[in-house]
């Protein structure tokens, strides 16, 4: 089993397990953020699974491979929609502009995917077609927006945490989530670069695969630490979050 396949399996498992647990929490609590976050991770895991089946199993030699590839691309856009709506629900819950922005970014990606498939690019490698870039850019925008909102919120919480006015565990969770968004953005940017270089042939330097393996694995580990951390990690966060004391 190659490093790429094994790392993909790990990422798929983490996304599906953590996503399912968050969806269960969201349903039990009636909490929209957990539902959207769970959907983000679950759809991401499912699209990775479709990709693996389409390219790394005997199904790659059958007509079903193209349908799995389309399922992968659709899964990415469903994950992105959940992520965009999650960012809006958590960081800008009262903003009509943020909601419109999220829906427009998602719509543009879906238009790109739909037109691309209609024109025959089922696999998503037609680098000379603008429709593919509309689809891919939507994913990049989703992760960049998520990072920008999360890191800004973290900066405010960190200042409050130093004075004992914010929960250090929650503050750290926001930081970890911003790291997950960075890993997603870097992965998408590298993938877009690889598509631009390889085009319909899908041929590009191995270094791109190596970077994407590293970033996706790092993102999966950050998700675990953010939402289901081991007790030792929580103790470490608490021990290193001593509130500032007044020197007077």
Image (cartoon, rainbow, N blue to C red):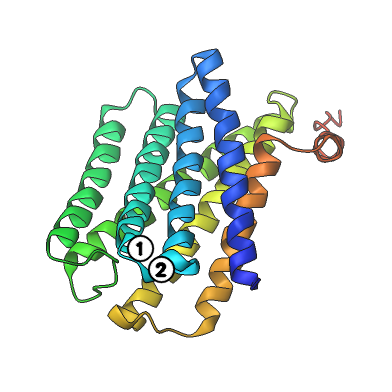
- In the rendered image, is residue 139 in sight? yes
The C terminus lies in quadrant: top right
The N terminus lies in quadrant: bottom right
Q: Secondary structure at mark 2?
A: helix
* Whole-number angstrom distance, CA of label 1 to CA of label 2: 5 Å
Q: Quadrant of residue 96?
A: top left
Residue 122 image point, x, y percent: 24, 63
User: According to the image, label 1 marks what residue?
Assistant: 65
**Which of the two residues, 84 or 28, is positioned nearer the viewer here?**
28
> Residue 73: which numbered mark, if any?
none
> Residue 60: which numbered mark, if any?
2
Residue 192 image point, x, y percent: 37, 69
Would residue 167 be found to the left or right of residue 151 on screen?
Answer: right
* Mark 2 crowdedness (10 Å alpha carbons): few <14, some 14-19, many ≥20: some
Determine contact: label 1, label 2, CB under 8 Å: yes
Would residue 229 be found to the left or right of residue 143 on screen?
Answer: right
Q: Residue at x 49, y 34 (%)?
A: 37
- In the rendered image, is residue 141 in sight? no
Badge count: 2
Q: Residue at x 21, y 44 (%)?
A: 107
Q: Residue at x 21, y 67 (%)?
A: 121
Residue extending farthest to the top is: 29
Q: Secondary structure at mark 1?
A: helix
Would residue 73 be found to the left or right of residue 241 on screen?
Answer: left
Would residue 187 be found to the left or right of residue 108 on screen?
Answer: right
Residue 27 image point, x, y percent: 51, 18
């Amino acid at each position: 089993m190659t490093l790429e396949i094994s790392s993909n399996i790990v990422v798929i498992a983490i996304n599906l397990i953590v996503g399912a647990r968050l969806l269960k929490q969201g349903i039990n609590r009636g909490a929209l953020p957990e539902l959207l976050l769970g959907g983000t991770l679950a759809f991401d895991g499912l699209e990775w699974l479709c990709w693996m089946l389409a390219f790394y199993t005997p199904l790659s030699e059958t007509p079903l491979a193209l349908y799995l590839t389309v399922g992968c691309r659709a899964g990415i856009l469903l994950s992105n929609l959940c992520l965009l709506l999650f960012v809006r629900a958590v960081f800008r819950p009262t903003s009509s502009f943020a909601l419109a922005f999220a829906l427009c970014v998602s719509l543009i990606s879906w238009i790109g995917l739909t037109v691309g498939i209609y024109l025959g690019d089922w696999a998503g490698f037609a680098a000379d077609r603008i429709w593919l870039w509309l689809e891919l850019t939507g994913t990049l925008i989703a992760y960049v927006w998520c990072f920008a909102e999360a890191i800004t919120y973290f900066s405010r919480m960190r200042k409050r945490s130093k004075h004992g006015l914010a929960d250090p565990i929650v503050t750290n969770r926001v930081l970890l989530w911003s790291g997950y968004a960075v890993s997603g953005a870097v992965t998408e940017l590298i993938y877009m670069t690889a598509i631009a270089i390889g085009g319909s042939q899908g041929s590009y330097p191995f270094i791109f695969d190596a970077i994407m393996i590293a970033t996706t694995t790092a993102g999966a580990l950050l998700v675990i630490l953010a939402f289901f951390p081991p007790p030792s990690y929580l103790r470490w966060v608490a021990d290193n979050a001593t509130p500032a004391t007044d020197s007077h």
